[in-house]
């Protein structure tokens, strides 16, 4: 594909959304039965995205309900509606003209180095503040 476009391979397979929505669909057009492969490829992307969304939303809703079980245990559908509405309005930002830049900012800063820093901070807090022995006792209780 790089030869056909007359560019370097590193320019064809760029990272991020360009890889999934530009490079792979272009490669699919060179396979036999391109409409079938294109449908299967985008169907796969859609199902992966929806599965991820279900997981994220269920994690957030369960965390909220478990934090205040006496108030929210019987109102889980309302919590779900609130979380979905909030995430919907937050996602509208990505649908604007500058949405691709917002997506790149979120992809570069929310899911990479900051996740490493948050993980290391959690380890330090558990080890020194909460205590390893108490943490291991809690794990034994949960098992």
Image (cartoon, rainbow, N blue to C red):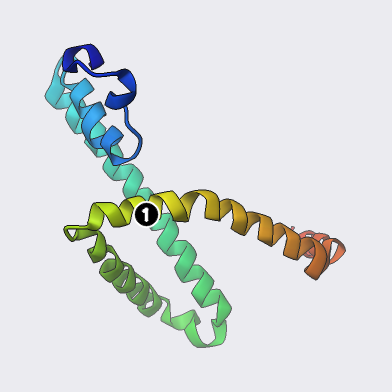
Residue positioned 34% across, 50% down in the render: 104
Determine whether 34 is above or below 123 in the image: above
Task: List x then y, in percent, for residue 95.
Answer: 20, 59
Q: Where is residue 89 in the image (x, y as percent from the top left)?
A: 26, 70
Residue at the (32%, 74%) spot, across then down = 81
In the shown orientation, is residue 102 left or right of residue 29?
right
Q: Name the residue under label 1.
A: 105
Is 20 placed left or right of 127 in the picture?
left
Q: Where is residue 98 in the image (x, y as percent from the top left)?
A: 21, 58
Farthest bottom residue in view: 71
Q: Which of 71 and 18 is in front in this view?
A: 18
**Residue, x 33% and y 47% (percent of image)?**
49
| Residue farthest along the front direction in this orientation | 7
Is the residue marked by circle 1 packed among few (<14), some (14-19), or many (20+) residues within 10 Å?
few
Going by the image, does 141 lie left or right of 11? Answer: right
How many marks on residues?
1
Q: Is mark 1 on a helix, strand or loop?
A: helix
Taking the image as shown, residue 121 lies to the left or right of residue 91, namely: right
Q: Residue 46, located in which quarter of the rendered image? A: top left
Residue furthest right as drawn = 133
Q: In this view, does 46 lie above or below 6?
A: below
When asked about the image quadrant of residue 37, the answer is top left
Which image quarter holds the C terminus?
Answer: bottom right
Q: In this view, does 13 lie above or below 140?
A: above
Does residue 51 lie above or below 140 as drawn?
A: above
Question: Residue 23, how many percent across, how many down?
Answer: 25, 28
- Quarter of the image for the N terminus: give it: top left
């Amino acid at each position: 594909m790089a030869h056909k476009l007359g560019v370097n391979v590193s320019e064809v397979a760029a990272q991020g959304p360009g890889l999934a929505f530009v490079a792979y669909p272009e490669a699919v057009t060179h396979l036999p039965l391109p409409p079938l492969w294109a449908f299967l490829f985008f169907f796969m992307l859609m199902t992966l995205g929806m599965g991820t969304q279900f997981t994220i939303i269920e994690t957030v809703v369960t965390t909220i309900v478990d934090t205040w079980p006496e108030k929210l245990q019987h109102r889980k559908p309302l919590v779900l509606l609130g979380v979905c509405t909030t995430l919907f309005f937050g996602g509208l930002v990505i649908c604007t003209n500058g949405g691709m830049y917002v997506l790149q900012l979120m992809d570069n800063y929310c899911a990479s180095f900051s996740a490493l820093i948050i993980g290391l901070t959690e380890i330090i807090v558990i080890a020194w503040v909460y205590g390893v022995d108490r943490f291991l006792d809690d794990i034994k209780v949960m098992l």
